[in-house]
């Protein structure tokens, strides 16, 4: 009898919590479903795109490079706040300069991947081909 009361109490509490947080649960499920559908559609699109491998390589390289940080400091000449942009410890006066430096870094990483690809394929397969023997 005692365990039956605790089980019933736990079930009621769980039902109340579920009812209370249902909108958040539903929103997160919808977000997950939308991301999943977008991923599936992107995979379908990539099957027809012969440049998809390059796009994926650039995406992976972007993940490996840090973001640009915007810092506000006082301009020593005028005393007004001025925005400065920092990328990998280097300060830039404009966002465009910082974006160009970041793009160069991403390009270097992607080129390095393709520079090392023949060596990796040779080590894996022995003949430098992807499976077309």
Image: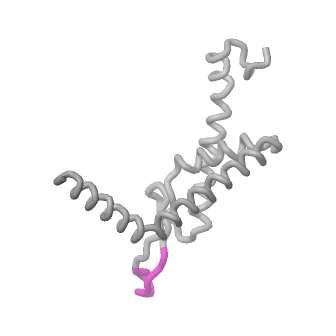
Q: Which residues are magenta?
A: 74-83
Q: Main secondary structure of the magenta part?
A: loop
Q: Nearer the viewer, residue 61 or 11?
A: 11
Residue 45 is inside the magenta segment: no
Residue 51 appears left or right of 74: right
Spot occupied by residue 59 in the image (x, y as percentages of width and height): 63, 48
Q: Give the total of numbered labels.
A: 0
Spot occupied by residue 80 in the image (x, y as percentages of width and height): 43, 86
Toward the front, the furthest residue is 1
For the point 53% across and 66% down, which residue is it?
A: 27
- The answer to which image quadrant residue 31 occupies is bottom right
Query: Quadrant where the C terminus lies?
Result: top right
Residue 24 appears left or right of 15: right
Considering only vertical position in the picture, is 73 above or below 44?
below
For the point 58% across and 62% down, which residue is it?
A: 30
For the point 18% across and 53% down, which residue is it?
A: 1
Residue 41 appears left or right of 62: right
Considering only vertical position in the picture, is 120 above or below 127?
below
Q: Nearer the viewer, residue 109 or 121?
A: 121
Spot occupied by residue 12 in the image (x, y as percentages of width and height): 32, 64
Residue 75 is inside the magenta segment: yes
Considering only vertical position in the picture, is 87 above or below 55?
below
Q: Nearer the viewer, residue 26 or 128?
A: 26
For the point 67% across and 34% down, which residue is it?
A: 114
Q: How is the image coloured?
A: one colour
Spot occupied by residue 5 in the image (x, y as percentages of width and height): 22, 58
- The answer to which image quadrant residue 127 occupies is top right
Considering only vertical position in the picture, is 71 above or below 46?
below
């Amino acid at each position: 009898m005692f365990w039956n009361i605790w089980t019933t109490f736990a079930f009621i509490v769980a039902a109340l919590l579920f009812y209370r947080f249902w909108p958040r649960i539903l929103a997160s499920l919808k977000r997950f479903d939308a991301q999943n559908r977008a991923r599936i559609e992107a995979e379908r699109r990539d099957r027809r795109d012969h440049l998809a491998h390059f796009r994926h390589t650039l995406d992976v390289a972007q993940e490996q490079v840090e973001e640009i940080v915007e810092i506000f400091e006082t301009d020593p000449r005028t005393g007004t706040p001025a925005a400065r942009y920092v990328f990998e410890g280097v300060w830039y006066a404009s966002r465009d300069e910082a974006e160009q430096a970041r793009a160069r870094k991403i390009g270097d990483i992607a080129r390095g991947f393709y520079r090392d690809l023949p060596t990796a394929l040779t080590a894996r397969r022995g003949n430098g081909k992807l499976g077309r023997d």
